Image (cartoon, coloured by chain):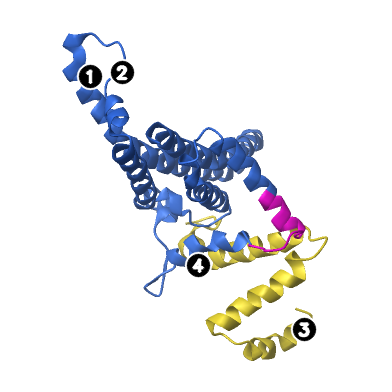
Amino acid sequence: MNENLFASFITPMILGLPLVTLIVLFPSLLFPTSNRLVNNRFVTLQQWMLQLVSKQMMSIHNPKGQTWTLTLMSLILFIGSTNLLGLLPHSFTPTTQLSMNLGMAIPLWAGAVITGFRNKTKTSLAHFLPQGTPTPLIPMLVIIETISLFIQPMALAVRLTANITAGHLLIHLIGGATLALMSISATTALITFIILILLTILEFAVAMIQAYVFTLLVSLYLHDNT
Amino acid sequence: MDSQTGELLSWILTQDFAPKGTAGAFQEYDNKYVNVKKGSLAGLSTVLAAYKLFNYCHSYKEFKHKWPRKYH
């Protein structure tokens, strides 16, 4: 059972060619672009949702930070759609791979931090020392703040990976338990099935929340640095 | 789309499989089921169902031996 449990997280290949590229590109098919003023229902809905999210997320930034709108909106759309598509049976979720999440987190975090260091050097360096610390504590606190700064991209990546992977594993396990219990006791199987339904609803929420959290944190790092 | 299953093979052979042709096929589906005034959920759901079917076929080997049987 151990080998089978993690079988769904293996990178899919077909005849030795990476299928994962196609799977990563697939969500972009679901977001059609349109140059019309009045669009079809599908595109209108997506544009409305995108406006809602971008207003809510980018209103805290100054104009310099708002140049990142395109990046952050693409990010939240990509993570949200990939996570939601991963809830379909037997599908592969790219965001369960730590490599992909690190590839998303590190450049974005580094971009925000380097922007801060280049444009507002004194303010960025000042973030290493919170206001009002007693003088003897300063060296230790600078070290702690540096560590907490460098842990930010790791935390971003690992948070997303762990949440989505754990959710998928739980669904596998509880689904397997329901099937196994059906021949033993129908009532327990029913209870387990209800738990499975609740878990699936949670997973839908988690899929979207994780996308939001990721993007929000990147935008916060940006806000600190512009 | 309006052809019968018997004509499916001959229809597939008429399609142009170069990238431009494949994009044309997507546009065809798009204009017929998504880009219409009263497009409904069915247009999107068919795409998702096809994706599900593709993943099912790809992972068929892995769960072939997990079917509910008396002796594993």
Query: What kind of residue is marked 4?
Result: His
Please tell me the numbered disc located at residue A130: 2
Residue A94 visible at all: yes
Q: Is residue A179 above or below residue B32?
A: above
Asked whether the beta carbons under mark 4 and mark 1 sit within 8 Å of each other, the answer is no
Q: Chain of mark 4?
A: B
* Residue span colored magenta: A33-47
At 31% from the left and 31% from the top, the residue drawn is A124
Q: Is residue A145 above or below residue B36?
A: above
At 72% from the left and 54% from the top, the residue drawn is A44
* Chain letter matching colour yellow: B
Using the numbered discs, state the Cα–Cα distance from disc 1 to disc 3 in whole angstroms.
72 Å
Q: Colour of chain A?
A: blue
Q: Quadrant of residue A8?
A: bottom left
Asked whether the beta carbons under mark 2 and mark 4 sit within 8 Å of each other, the answer is no
Write down the residue under mark 3.
B3
Please tell me the numbered disc located at residue B58: 4
Q: Position of residue A94 (x, y in %)?
A: 45, 54
Write down the residue under mark 1.
A141
| Same chain check for tags 2 and 1 | yes
Query: What kind of residue is marked 1?
Result: Leu
| Same chain check for tags 4 and 1 | no
Which element carries disc 2, helix, strand or loop?
Answer: loop
Using the numbered discs, state the Cα–Cα distance from disc 4 to disc 1 in whole angstroms.
53 Å
Q: Chain of mark 1?
A: A
Left or right relative to A61: residue A33? right
Residue depth check, mark 4 versus mark 1: number of the one nearer the observer: 1
Using the numbered discs, state the Cα–Cα distance from disc 2 to disc 1 in whole angstroms.
8 Å
Which element carries disc 3, helix, strand or loop?
Answer: loop
